Amino acid sequence: MAGAGVTTSGAAGAAAELVAGAVLSGGTFGTAGSAAFAGTFSTGLLSVVAAVVAGGGEGVPVYSIFSQQPTHDAASSSKLPRDKMTNCWGQRISILYGPAETMKRQPQYLFFAATLAFCWLAMQAVHEIGHMSAALLSGGHVVRVILHPATFSYTQLSRNPHPNLVTWMGPIIGTIVPIALLLLARALRWRGWYVFRFFAGFCFIANGVYIAFGSLGNIGDAGDLLRHGSPIYLLWMFGAITIPIGLWLWNGLEPHFGLGPNASTPDPMVCYVVTALLVIVVLLELLLSTREVVA
């Protein structure tokens, strides 16, 4: 968010709740488990709670929950292919994963949570870069840029001759840069390209929700755009374009994070890199967020 004069304005922020899961239904065995993530942002404090239980593999160590007496005991049935597990009436059997399988999957849960946290912080940084670069190129004066893990980001300006341009460049640059990074990752065949795709989708959804739904309450950038003369339908159009693109970018990425019925084991190196980047970003923001930018 970019603010003009001596006052500051709110930051780019969007509360998101992502619930993804696989359920047993319709007479077919399907996926045994579910994946859920809920992210709550209150007064700028990021709280990530990841609880994911997802199925995979040919046979799994399980605690079986049967509606009727099974033909196999727990020891033998745990080694059977899941599509062969039926009870004595020939009906499909529902099972739940036991602690051993859940413990084995904990690293991929942490990888997914670290990716979400990194995307939230990086999305805000790219958004503010858009505000700051537009302000500098249009004759504005940037007093400071706030980027901190425990608050929403914002850019404070003491002079802003083109407020509409500066405000729009936050969400526009905030979506263009992630797509450019994704294209670069694909062109160079980086092994963690799917993290860039997830990040791009995250930025499209977050910026779209922020601008479109923020217009309903004159919140942050959306409120500034309306005050400076942007028609509300442009804000809705922005959200109507970016949100579906973000969801499309996310589509089919679950297996790369070890989730869903076709889950694969996440690349350990990619996990380490994402976690290291998250730690570095948090430390940099803690160290540099209070410093003023002279421009």
Image: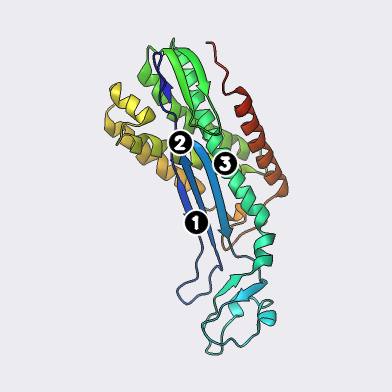
Asked if the residue at tag 2 contacts the one at tag 1, i.e. Cβ–Cβ closer than 8 Å, the answer is no
Secondary structure under badge 1?
strand
Asked if the residue at tag 3 contacts the one at tag 2, i.e. Cβ–Cβ closer than 8 Å, the answer is no
The answer to which of 194 and 117 lies nearer the viewer is: 117
Name the residue that disc number 2 marks. 43
Q: Residue 279 in the image: x percent, y percent?
A: 66, 36
Q: Nearer the viewer, mark 2 or mark 3?
A: 2
Bin the neighbour count of mark 1 within 10 Å (Cα to Cα): few under 14, some 14-19, many 20 and up: some
**Residue at coordinates 49% horizontally, 19% vertically from top-left?**
132
Secondary structure under badge 3?
helix
The answer to which of 234 and 89 lies nearer the viewer is: 89
Instruction: Say whether disc 1 or disc 2 marks the residue closer to the N-terminus.
Output: 1
Side of 276 relative to 138 (left or right): right
Specify the label residue 117 is tagged with. Answer: 3
Instruction: Say whether disc 2 or disc 3 marks the residue closer to the N-terminus.
Output: 2
**Residue at coordinates 56% horizontally, 68% vertically from top-left?**
32
The amino acid pointed to by label 2 is: Thr
The amino acid pointed to by label 3 is: Ala
The answer to which of 37 and 273 lies nearer the viewer is: 37
**Residue at coordinates 64% horizontally, 85% vertically from top-left?**
72
Specify the label residue 52 is tagged with. Answer: none
Name the residue that disc number 1 marks. 20
The amino acid pointed to by label 1 is: Ala
Q: CA distance from mark 1 to mark 2?
A: 26 Å
The answer to which of 290 and 124 lies nearer the viewer is: 290
Q: Nearer the viewer, mark 1 or mark 2?
A: 2
Q: Residue 28 in the image: x percent, y percent?
A: 50, 75
Instruction: Say whether disc 3 or disc 1 marks the residue closer to the N-terminus.
Output: 1
Q: CA distance from mark 3 to mark 1?
A: 17 Å
Identify the residue at the far bottom of this view. Answer: 88
